[in-house]
Amino acid sequence: MFPSPVLTARQTRFIDEYLVDANGTQAAIRAGYGAAGARVAAHRLLTNVAISSAIGARQKADATRLWIDRENVLAGLLEAVEMAREQRNPAGMIAGLREIAKLMGFYAPTAAKVDVGLRASAERDRIEAMTDVELFSLIGEISAVTQI
């Protein structure tokens, strides 16, 4: 078992500040990193395994302490959307629904695996082997066909 890495005082302060508003750049500035390089420092800090693990552990502890889970957050957002509907506030409804969609993972990127057969692979190899002149000629032929 490896010992857990010791964080510096400034790294610990960054974690505290990041948990305030989840804004890495501002957290870095408030933790004492220079404003000019705060964005880069925040990225470096947030990709540090020890720091991201500490942030995750603190968020989980806060959620447990406050009895907040995904279901409670979703219920609160749905209640807010309903209140916005009653107040005839479409912007509020949209904002609430956007947050619900994020929570539900609707904005998560999707990965698509495309399996090209041997024929497509051979065609790709043929096109990659073409000179610029041959490629421009091919583009001209395609353009002429699509304009008909």
Image: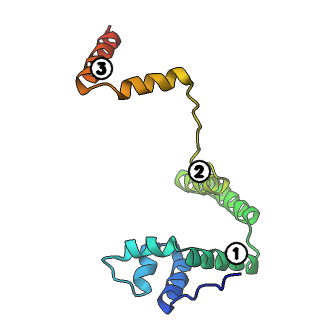
The residue to which callout 1 is attached is 60
Amino acid type of the residue that numbered disc 3 sits on in the rendered structure: Ile
Q: Nearer the viewer, residue 93 or 56?
A: 56
Among numbered discs 2 and 3, the one appearing first in the sequence: 2
Residue 132: give x, y in percent of width and height. 25, 27
The residue to which callout 2 is attached is 108
| Mark 2 secondary-structure assignment | loop
Q: In the drawing, does residue 41 fall left or right of residue 77?
A: left
The vertical placement of 53 against 136, above or below, is below
- Residues at marks 3 and 1, CA–CA distance in whole angstroms: 55 Å
| Mark 3 secondary-structure assignment | helix
Residue 22: give x, y in percent of width and height. 52, 73
Amino acid type of the residue that numbered disc 1 sits on in the rendered structure: Lys
The residue to which callout 3 is attached is 139
- Residues at marks 2 and 3, CA–CA distance in whole angstroms: 35 Å
Q: Give the crowd class for mark 1: few <14, some 14-19, many >=20 residues within 10 Å.
A: some
Q: Residue at x 32, y 7 (%)?
A: 148
Contact between labelled residues 3 and 2, with CB atoms less than 8 Å apart: no
Question: Is label 3 or label 1 in front?
Answer: 3
Residue 85: give x, y in percent of width and height. 63, 52
Q: Which residue is drawn at 54% across and 79% down?
A: 20
